[in-house]
Image (cartoon, rainbow, N blue to C red):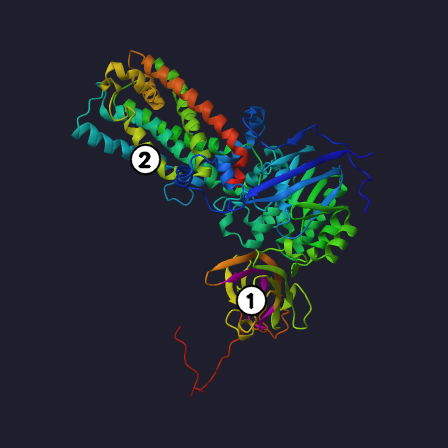
């Protein structure tokens, strides 16, 4: 005897590419209208659209904890946004029975000038709690967040950890029947994450229905009884957690450090050049997402060159988590590239990156195939692959034995010269 | 994992239907009512935050209109010698300035409110109407405080309001609805075109001089009264003076045409807003 509480049928969501521009000025609309007053806005712009969700259908029964997995940009977050009514679908419909709490971000609506106490009320109200409900659970929320002492201090004086704990404590006490959660466990320290996972496990035992988006396969495996896998906005697989997760990890989709296209016609690019594959390899030549900070590694790019007269080359731009481009590198100036014969071919280029160069953290690579004179970008694959640099803290890295935060976007191991000259006697300090 | 053991029955009968939004939508006022507590909290937040980390805090609510009134009395009353229908100029101007300041502040805050609340709009669902409405209501608080100053000023000049004062809430309501109506239009436009925020200072300035605040409406020739009353704030200011300063003849024509304009602005604004709101989180 199960009740369907969520029925999603053929939901699709279209975004216009270029919708990323910060905002439209009225002038732009006006000038584009003046230039061609007879084409409507739709036909002029429809050529560049992106289907973030493409006819996704599934049902969720009451008490299900459904995991949603897939690589970045596969449409997981968009799906939650549509279901939580933050944005409306382009096509299709969905029916949800019961009250919903959506948690797309921790600390939604927090205001830095308000105190912890005030923020609990504000954030609770934004998440859909009634004032009475917040009042009743206030002490519990405070205890969960472990910020009792600072509850009447403005939030701007909180440490990041305290903010995160408070931010999660509020939604953890929601009483809704259906929960949508987007990767919120990625924050906070280990202890706190465990606490949150425990809280969510309880919720699922109480028979609450939840949709849970995550990149953490262990968390999904532990919490969810069923998983759906999305890829490029399409629902690829739907089934018991362990089965879907296994097939996801076995497929290339599971690794963020490798992508490949087997078919020329489907690969990103134009008639002149297309990307075949890109992968991150460690010192031993094994494809991996996690790299040791002290060890060199390489990025291997394969691409098709389909026009003998032009000379496309690969460019890599490396971005850190804050979206800062650390550098762009190209094979262009190297002799091996220059010596290529002018014929259609499959090109394999490897870029070698030294150890002790990146700081710890997450990085993503944007791959561009370009040719110069005339300047053309044949392919541009944003966030093509991603990798993670970790420091084992064994004393061999730049930080030595120091275990706390180490500033800087790069972490080169530079040469230092130290000279010394003994003093005749100790210098007296002037207090 | 077997979770199916003790599943309680579904408590609510609440159903949410998700569909693409097309064409005109219903206003769905019931839903707005359901979210009234959020409206309260957002208003409360705006009021709380406004004077945080200021030395004299809420005193600013009194000082701002006070200084404006002194400045205007000096320039328009003393130097330009603009007539004020026999009422002491400071009292005359302050009774017009107060609703105007409420309106201008509410309008400015409402117009930029959606963009400044982008954070929650892209993450949580609620009727978006709540955002500009809370911005307007937060301004009402300032107005109420500054009203005490006005009463003091009237008594200082020996003006004791008569029963007309009972009509005052109606004119306050008109101001709020007018700010909401124009605010709905402008903030929905501001989501798409950030040009809006740059035009608001000009708009309010122009509007200020088109409204009988520093001059009496008796300066306007009779044949233009109806057109003049199309400016909803003209009716509001006239109404304020009528109910506070104990004028005898009720400025019926101006208030009527102002009320009609207010109702028109409010309903069209609300409809336009509701129509646009489903796309806010994608465009903002």
Q: What element carries label 1?
A: loop
Q: Which chain carries label 2?
A: B
Residue that label 1 marks = A359
**What is the number of callouts on the image?**
2
Residue labelled with disc 2: B202
Q: Position of residue B194 (x, y in %)?
A: 42, 40
Residue A360 colored in magenta in the image: yes
Dot 1 falls on which chain?
Answer: A
Count neighbours of disc 2 (C-alpha within 10 A) and say few if under 14, some if 14 to 19, many if 20 or more.
Answer: few
Disc 2 secondary structure class: helix
A250 drawn magenta: no
Mark 2 and mark 1 in contact? Answer it, CB < 8 Å.
no
User: Looking at the image, can residue A340 be seen?
Assistant: yes
Furthest-top residue in view? Answer: B249
Q: Can residue A103 be seen in this view?
A: no
Question: Does A38 sit left or right of B2 as displayed?
Answer: left
Q: In this view, does A389 lie to the left or right of B183?
A: right
Q: Distance between the residues labelled 2 and 1?
A: 50 Å
Above-or-below relation of B81 to A68? above
Image quadrant holding the N terminus of chain A, namely top right
Q: What's the residue at 73%, 34% (across, down)?
A: A5
Residue A50 at x, y percent in the picture: 58, 45
Q: Magenta region, mostly helix, strand or loop?
A: strand
Q: Which label number is shown at residue A48?
A: none
What's drawn in magenta, residue-wise? Answer: A349-371
Quadrant of the image occupied by residue A397: bottom right
Relative to A179, does residue A408 appear above or below in the rendering? below
Q: Which of A139 and B79 is in front in this view?
A: B79
A387 lies left or right of B282: right
Q: Position of residue A204 (x, y in %)?
A: 74, 43
Q: Please, is residue A382 above or below residue B8 in the view?
A: below
- Identified at 16% across, 30% down, the residue is B79
């Amino acid at each position: 005897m199960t009740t369907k509480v969520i029925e999603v049928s053929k939901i699709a969501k279209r975004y216009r590419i270029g919708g990323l521009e910060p905002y439209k000025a009225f002038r732009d609309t006006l000038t584009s209208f003046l230039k061609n007053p007879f084409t409507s806005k739709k036909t002029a712009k429809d050529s560049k659209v992106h289907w973030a969700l493409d006819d996704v259908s599934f049902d969720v029964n009451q008490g299900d904890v459904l995991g949603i997995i897939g690589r970045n940009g596969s449409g997981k977050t968009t799906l939650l946004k549509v279901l939580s009514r933050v944005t409306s679908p382009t096509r299709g419909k969905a029916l949800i029975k019961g009250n919903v709490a959506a948690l797309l971000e921790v600390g939604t609506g927090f205001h830095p000038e308000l105190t912890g106490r005030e923020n609990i009320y504000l954030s609770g109200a934004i998440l859909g709690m009634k004032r009475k409900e917040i009042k009743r659970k206030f002490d519990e929320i405070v205890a969960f967040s472990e910020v009792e002492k600072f509850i009447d201090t403005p939030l701007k004086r909180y440490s990041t950890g305290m903010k995160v704990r408070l931010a999660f404590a509020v939604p953890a006490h929601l009483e809704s029947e259906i929960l949508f959660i987007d990767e919120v466990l990625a924050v906070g320290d280990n202890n706190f994450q465990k606490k949150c996972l425990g809280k969510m496990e309880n919720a699922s035992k109480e028979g609450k229905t939840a949709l849970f988006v995550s990149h953490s396969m262990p968390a999904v495996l532990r919490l969810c009884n069923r998983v759906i896998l999305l890829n490029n906005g399409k629902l690829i697989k739907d089934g018991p957690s362990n089965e879907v997760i296994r097939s996801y990890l076995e497929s290339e989709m599971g690794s963020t450090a490798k992508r490949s296209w087997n078919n020329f016609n489907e690969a990103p690019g134009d008639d002149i050049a297309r990307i075949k594959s890109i992968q991150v390899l460690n010192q031993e030549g094994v494809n991996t997402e996690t790299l040791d900070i002290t060890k060199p590694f390489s990025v291997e790019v394969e691409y098709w060159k389909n026009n003998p007269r032009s000379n496309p080359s690969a460019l890599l731009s490396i971005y850190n988590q804050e979206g800062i481009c650390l550098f762009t590198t190209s094979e262009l100036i190297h002799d091996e590239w220059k010596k290529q014969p002018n014929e259609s071919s499959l090109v394999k280029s490897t870029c070698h990156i030294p150890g002790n160069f990146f700081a710890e953290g997450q990085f993503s690579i944007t791959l561009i195939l370009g040719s110069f004179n005339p300047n053309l970008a044949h392919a541009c694959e944003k966030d093509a692959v991603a990798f993670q640099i970790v420091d084992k803290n064994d004393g061999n890295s730049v930080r030595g034995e120091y275990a706390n935060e180490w500033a800087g976007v790069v972490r080169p191991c530079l040469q230092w010269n130290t000279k010394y000259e003994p003093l005749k006697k100790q210098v007296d300090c002037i207090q | 994992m077997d979770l199916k053991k003790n599943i309680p029955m579904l408590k609510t009968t609440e159903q949410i239907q998700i569909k693409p939004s097309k064409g005109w939508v219903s206003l769905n006022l019931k839903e707005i009512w359901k979210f009234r507590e959020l409206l309260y909290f957002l208003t409360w937040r705006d009021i709380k935050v406004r004077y945080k980390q200021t030395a004299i805090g809420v005193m600013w609510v009194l000082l701002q209109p006070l200084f404006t009134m002194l400045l205007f009395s000096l320039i328009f009353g003393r130097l330009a010698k603009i007539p004020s229908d026999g009422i002491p100029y400071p009292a005359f101007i302050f009774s017009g300035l107060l609703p105007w300041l409420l309106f201008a502040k509410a309008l400015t805050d409402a117009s930029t409110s959606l963009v400044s609340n982008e954070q929650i709009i892209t993450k949580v669902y609620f009727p978006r109407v709540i955002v500009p409405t809370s911005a307007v209501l937060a301004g009402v608080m300032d107005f109420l405080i500054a009203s005490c100053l006005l009463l003091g000023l009237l008594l200082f000049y020996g003006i004791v309001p008569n029963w007309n004062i009972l009509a005052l809430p109606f004119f306050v309501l008109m101001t709020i609805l007018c700010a909401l109506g124009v605010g709905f239009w402008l903030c929905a436009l501001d989501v798409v075109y950030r040009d809006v925020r740059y035009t608001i200072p000009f708009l309010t300035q122009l509007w200020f001089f088109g409204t009988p605040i520093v001059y009496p409406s008796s300066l306007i020739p009779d044949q233009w009264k109806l057109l003049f009353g199309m400016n909803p704030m003209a009716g509001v200011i006239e109404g304020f003076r009528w109910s506070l300063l104990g004028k005898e003849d009720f400025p019926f024509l101006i208030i009527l045409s102002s009320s009609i304009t207010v109702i028109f602005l409010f309903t069209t604004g609300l409809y336009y807003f509701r129509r646009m709101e489903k796309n806010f989180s994608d465009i903002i």
